[in-house]
Image (cartoon, helix red, strand yellow):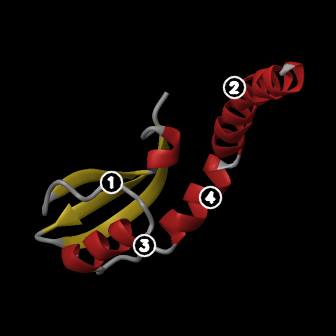
Amino acid sequence: MMKRSHLMKSIFGLMPILAISYCSYNFATAEQRMRQTCDQIVPNMSIQALDDFAQTRGLTQPHTTSGVTFLAEQKTFGRSACQVVLHKGVVQSVQYHFAD
């Protein structure tokens, strides 16, 4: 009986450590990962292609067809994103954006 309770304490003790490690890793590598992702979005990409791109990479969907929209990474709770400038449903420019 003592062995089982010791095992349970060990498991519950490791869970917060693993969760913190996972989140820390995601935040530490976010800039490099998102800069690479933003580089894959090219000018003259259609809004449909951009929407498909965002969906396949786990980014938030574009919210407009003209103006500025952010394709944020969900792993970092939206803090790392690609800032995309659209005009009439076509990508004009893209840059990495970090929400402070």
List the residue tagged with mark 3.
Answer: 41
List the residue tagged with mark 4.
Answer: 33
Q: Earlier in the sequence, mark 3 or mark 4?
A: 4
Above or below: residue 38 compared with residue 79: below
Above or below: residue 79 compared with residue 5: below
Q: Earlier in the sequence, mark 3 or mark 2?
A: 2
Q: Which numbered mark, 2 or 1, is in the foreground of this view? A: 2
Find out whether the residues at labels 3 and 4 contact each other: C-beta distance under 8 Å. Answer: no
| Residue at horizontal 83 percent and vertical 21 percent from the top | 1
Disc 4 element: helix
Find out whether the residues at labels 3 and 2 contact each other: C-beta distance under 8 Å. Answer: no
| Residue at horizontal 42 percent and vertical 60 percent from the top | 58
Q: Which numbered mark, 3 or 4, is in the foreground of this view? A: 4
Residue 26 in which image quadrant: top right
Amino acid, disc 1:
Thr
Amino acid, disc 2:
Pro
Task: Give the residue furthest to the right.
Answer: 3
List the residue tagged with mark 1.
Answer: 60
Q: What's the CA distance linking mark 3 and mark 2?
A: 36 Å
Of residues 16 and 81, which is closer to you in this image?
16
Amino acid, disc 4:
Arg
Q: How crowded is mark 3: few (under 14 residues within 10 Å), some or many (20 or more)?
A: some
List the residue tagged with mark 2.
Answer: 16
Q: What's the CA distance linking mark 4 and mark 1?
A: 15 Å
| Residue at horizontal 16 percent and vertical 66 percent from the top | 87
Q: Where is residue 54 in the image (x, y as percent from the top left)?
A: 36, 66
Q: Which of marks 2 and 4 is nearer the N terminus?
A: 2
Of residues 42 and 57, which is closer to you in this image?
57
Q: Which of marks 1 and 3 is nearer the N terminus?
A: 3
Q: Which of marks 2 and 1 is nearer the N terminus?
A: 2
Above or below: residue 100 compared with residue 45: above
